[in-house]
Image: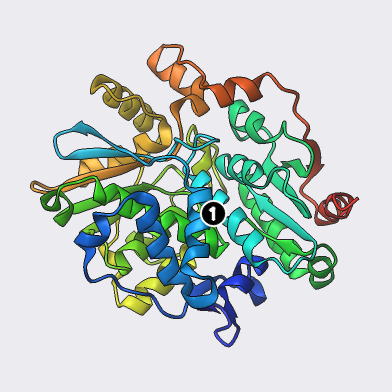
Amino acid sequence: MKLYNIKENDEQVSFGQAVRQGLGRNQGLFFPSQLPFFDDIDSLLAEDFTSRSSKILSALIGDELSEQQVSELVNAAFQFPAPIKAVKDGVYALELFHGPTLAFKDFGGRFMAQSLAAVSDGGKITILTATSGDTGAAVAHAFYGMDDINVVILYPKGKISPLQESLFCTLGKNIHTVAINGDFDDCQALVKNAFDDEKLRQDIGLNSANSINISRLMAQICYYFEAAAQMSKTERENLVISVPSGNFGNLTAGLLAKALGLPVKRFIAATNANDTVPRYLETGQWDPKPTVATTSNAMDVSQPNNWPRIEELCRVKEWGLETLGKGAVTDTQSAESVKELHELGYLCEPHGAIAYRVLDQQLAEGETGLFLCTAHPAKFKEVVDDILETDIDLPGPLAKHAAMELLSEERDNDFDALKEVLYAAQK
């Protein structure tokens, strides 16, 4: 498998190089030079989750890893289900929160950890990543205790939920967490600055586990196929999928699934008040505004890193961006949808509720709707309890880590301060 740098097309790398590097020159994202296509989609969907995922990922990776190696990676990473639940006639929720950190990013984080171990050349590795909530926990738990890999996770101080914070800031060992005085976009900018520092990259073996890393994105493709596999053939022939979108990795993976042959009629990009993409699709003007804090904080991103991949895929496939559905939802509207879903007998949190609301507004007669539920409602217990006037129970992993001491250090939004942390993590 060859991948090219979207910004500088002459930079071409293997899968292993892309996993180890994370980003290309000039902070460019890697993109597959060729995409396989599955003709017999019904036979593929008839297989079980891990067998099907192994075939999909093996076709993407090519002969760089054997089919047996890919199968072993998948079986080690995907040890939990991705079930769909009927919410009402013709509308399903795809539950992506049954992994160890109760969020969809467990799929990508664990597959990346397995992939990196498989392609490592034995040198030192430092994983640097920014999180708006769920990435941090997924990456921390995926890499926790791995030899010769240090992990440094940046997050905006006071702008993720306490339960999200407790899941990844209580581990210690090779996991280092830093609360940045700024917002998520500031954290992302620090990560990009680190990758632009060639000496730093070489000194510490810098890599990123954000959804900019192609291995994470590839893993996420698989659960779109798994969702369709749980539907009847008739239902999936008119399938509309609504994706709660922040950094836009999840939507990128869904569109890649469609490019590989998954029959999806259309996708909907659902955002909160940080609506750069919906406005861009409406006006054609890319005009990021300052990031606004919302109750769906994992989507508090005004400059989504993965958007260039979506534009590149649409260019390659000759898909018009105007075919993407879009919608932005306020906190008040999100709360209304959490209540509506609860009345329908389904407990949801704000991110999934945003995807549901836009889907419900745009779903036409005869279409089947699917919205992604990206985190367990208990990860946003304070918000959900307030909306529903209830007291939802904490699942085991959350209860355990909520009682533990936070080990984070606080730093200003300053690149020199970050460099100190990165070099100190090597000791």
* Residue 281, visible in the rendered structure: yes
Q: Residue at x 40, y 52 (%)?
A: 50
Residue 141 lies, with reference to residue 215, above or below; the image says: above
Q: Position of residue 364 (x, y in %)?
A: 13, 48
Determine crowd level at label 1: few under 14, some 14-19, many 20+ residues with C-alpha closer than 10 A. many
- From what the image shows, is residue 409 above or below residue 405? below
Asked whether, in this view, residue 122 is left or right of residue 74, the answer is right
* SS class, disc 1: helix
Question: What residue appears at the point 22 percent right and 33 percent down from the top-left corner?
Answer: 86
Snapshot quadrant of residue 374: top left
Give left or right: position of 403 versus 343: right
In the rendered view, tell whether residue 408 sits above or below residue 78. Answer: above
Residue depicted at x 44% and y 27%: 377
**Pick the front one: 43 or 272:** 43
374 or 298, which is in the foreground? Answer: 374
The image quarter in which residue 29 lies: bottom right
Q: Position of residue 304 (x, y in %)?
A: 52, 57
Residue drawn at (55%, 22%), measured in percent from left and top? Answer: 396
Q: Amino acid at mark 1?
A: Phe
Using residue 130 as the reference point, say whether residue 372 is left or right of it. left
Residue position for label 1: 111
